[in-house]
Amino acid sequence: MGAAPEKIGAGSLICCEGEVLLLQRRSKHNDHTWGLPGGNADPGEELWATAVREAAEEMGGMPPQHTLRGKLLVVRGKRDEKHYTVFVLEVPKAVR
């Protein structure tokens, strides 16, 4: 990969019994598209903190009961300049 990324962010893939949570975006650039809760990291912010903050902003908070199953890094952009970490969470059916 080489140079440090120009932009970093994080989000959550929230799974429950084979289904995932998607949010419909309402924004200038991505109106009516579907995606994971998440966004850009603030300067110096840890990526898990970014995912938690974005979940609070976009859906009122993280599910109260969740298990972190893993994380993955998505590298995007023409020069691989955007790095986005997805935290994979599992929630029990009762939380849905």
Image (tube, rainbow, N blue to C red):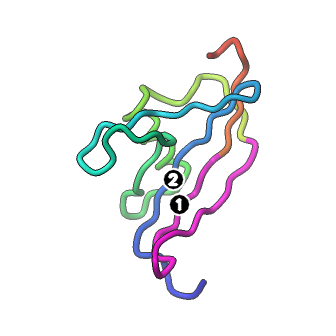
Magenta segment boundaries in residue numbering: 69-87
* Amino acid of disc 2: Ala
Q: Is residue 18 above or below residue 68?
A: above
Residue 82 image point, x, y percent: 47, 69
Residue 59 image point, x, y percent: 43, 28
Say whether disc 1 or disc 2 marks the residue closer to the N-terminus: 2
- The answer to whether marks 1 and 2 mark residues whose Cβ atoms lie closer than 8 Å is yes
Q: Is residue 38 above or below residue 60?
A: below
Q: Examine the structure image and report whether residue 40 is included in the region drawn in magenta.
A: no
Q: CA distance from mark 1 to mark 2?
A: 5 Å
> Circle 1 — which element?
strand
> Circle 2 — which element?
strand
Category of crowding for the residue at label 2, using alpha-carbon neighbours closer than 10 angstroms: few (below 14), some (14–19), many (at least 20): many
Q: Which residue is mark 2?
A: 10
Q: Is residue 41 above or below residue 59?
A: below
Residue 85 image point, x, y percent: 58, 57
Q: Residue at x 56, y 69 (%)?
A: 75
Q: Quadrant of residue 54?
A: top left
User: What is the residue that sits farthest to the bottom in this orientation?
Assistant: 2
Q: Residue at x 28, y 51 (%)?
A: 29
State the residue in front, 74 or 56.
74
Q: Which residue is mark 1?
A: 84
- Is residue 12 rendered to the left or right of residue 25? right
Q: Is residue 29 above or below residue 94?
A: below
Q: Examine the structure image and report whether residue 79 is included in the region drawn in magenta.
A: yes
- Is residue 24 rendered to the left or right of residue 64? left
For the stretch drawn in magenta, what is the main secondary structure? Answer: strand
Q: Residue at x 42, y 63 (%)?
A: 44
Q: Quadrant of the C terminus?
A: top right
Figure label count: 2
